[in-house]
Image (cartoon, rainbow, N blue to C red):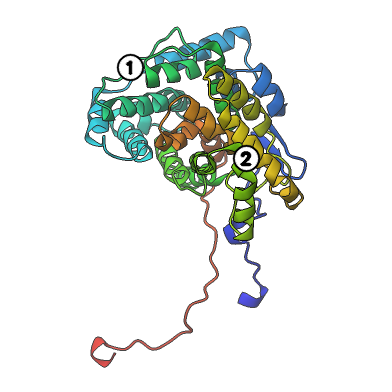
Amino acid sequence: MSENVKINRGLKGVYFERCGVSDIDGARGELSYRGYSIHDLATRSSFEEVCYLLIFGELPTTEELAAFDARLKAARVLPDAVYDIIAACGAGHPMDVLRTAVSALAALEPAAREVGEEAFIENGIRLTSQVPMIIAAHEAIRNGRDPVAADDSLGHAANWLWMLKGKKPSEDAARLADVDFILHAEHGANASSFAARVTIGTETNLHGGIVTALSTLAGPAHGGAAEDVMKMVHEIGKPENAAAYVKAKRAAKEAVTGFGHRVYRKEDPRARHMREGVRKLGEEMGAPEWYEILQAVVEAMKPYARHGLNVNVDFYSGVIYQLHGIPMDLYVPIFAIGRMPGWVIQCIEQQRGNILIRPLTLYNGPEPRAYLPIAAR
């Protein structure tokens, strides 16, 4: 039997389901959400609008957006027990604390245990607002400060920066964070979204799926690229060192972080929007050298573009966080803030016409053999 079975390791190239959310054309370097180009959404929309689009399937009217925004803002509340849990886990990695807090919410909020599409939407909206609160609260508590209360006069991205830093961001900084969340909001059957679908396939609640997604995102092969890019930038130090750095990496047959993607063969379509944001924020913050180092690496990597090693979205994200003075161990949790609506709709789609996801592994162990009692081994 084994001779006739084709193994697709990592399920590469395998379509396991239909999905009406994001369309990725890796060969052409294109991405759309619900039929809308990522370029239009990144330049003309807001994260709140994109959340609505992903969850409900259409861009909202003015009235629908106002109502949806009100639901998001009303959900900016955490039970007191969650703050106690965050404090107890204060020394932990932010992703571990986030996962633990979301799991605790499943036990502390009775509505979290409800299933069905309406329950998933309601719980998804609530979690979308609670996740940035958890991350910001942990950052405050582990540094000996009181968590900053949410400001309902601010949008989702601006409020996140306010809760994190205790200082209202500039309009440009808030907009760049908003674009960052839009670009990370949804990306098909990536590892964390697929893992969430596997969990929801067992007919559990939304929080269970999100905990699974967070656990999967925490792995450096999925969510850690932005942090690794920032480490690379520090290692390079100056733009003039980039060419030698790339040459040494390629000679050693080592990957250059931030280049290449499992899906895209051309430049990640999300990258261009982060590139310009890094340039502007660097100038605003008086630190243009970070952008210059990144662009020097891009220039040094041009000969390898024909092999599919093009820049991806995470190449620029880390520098944006660095310019905001955000610790590196928060980079993956920030990814989670943006990806929340994508996880929510992937879980909802899995629940519709649900089927247990149960692939096969091809056995390649020992041939049948006789059992020996322990005295005879």
Which residue is found at the position 72% from the left and 47% from the top? 265
Which image quadrant for residue 316?
top right
Q: Is residue 362 above or below residue 100?
A: below
Amino acid type, residue under disc 2 in the picture: Glu
Q: Position of residue 99 (x, y in %)?
A: 36, 38
The front one of 219 and 197 is 219
Q: Is residue 277 above or below residue 61?
A: below
Judge the density around disc 1: few (<14), some (14-19), many (≥20) Cα neighbours within 10 Å: some
Mark identifier at residue 264: none
The number of discs equals 2
**Residue 26 visible to an observer of this rendering:** yes
> Which quadrant holds the C terminus?
bottom left
Q: Is residue 357 above or below residue 23?
A: below
Q: Which residue is mark 1?
A: 148
Left-right relation of 166 to 263: left
Q: Position of residue 87 (x, y in %)?
A: 23, 31
Can you name the residue that lies furthest to the front here? Answer: 240
Mark 1 secondary-structure assignment: loop
Q: Which residue is mark 2?
A: 240
> Which quadrant holds the N terminus?
bottom right
The front one of 48 and 162 is 162
Amino acid type, residue under disc 1 in the picture: Val
Measure the alpha-carbon separation of dots 2 and 1. Answer: 41 Å
Mark 2 secondary-structure assignment: helix
Q: Position of residue 97 (x, y in %)?
A: 33, 37
**Dot in front, 2 or 1:** 2
Q: Are marks 2 and 1 in contact (CB under 8 Å)?
A: no
Which residue is found at the position 63% from the left and 25% from the top? 57
Q: Earlier in the sequence, mark 2 or mark 1?
A: 1
Which residue is found at the position 73% from the left and 53% from the top? 307
Q: Position of residue 352 (x, y in %)?
A: 56, 37
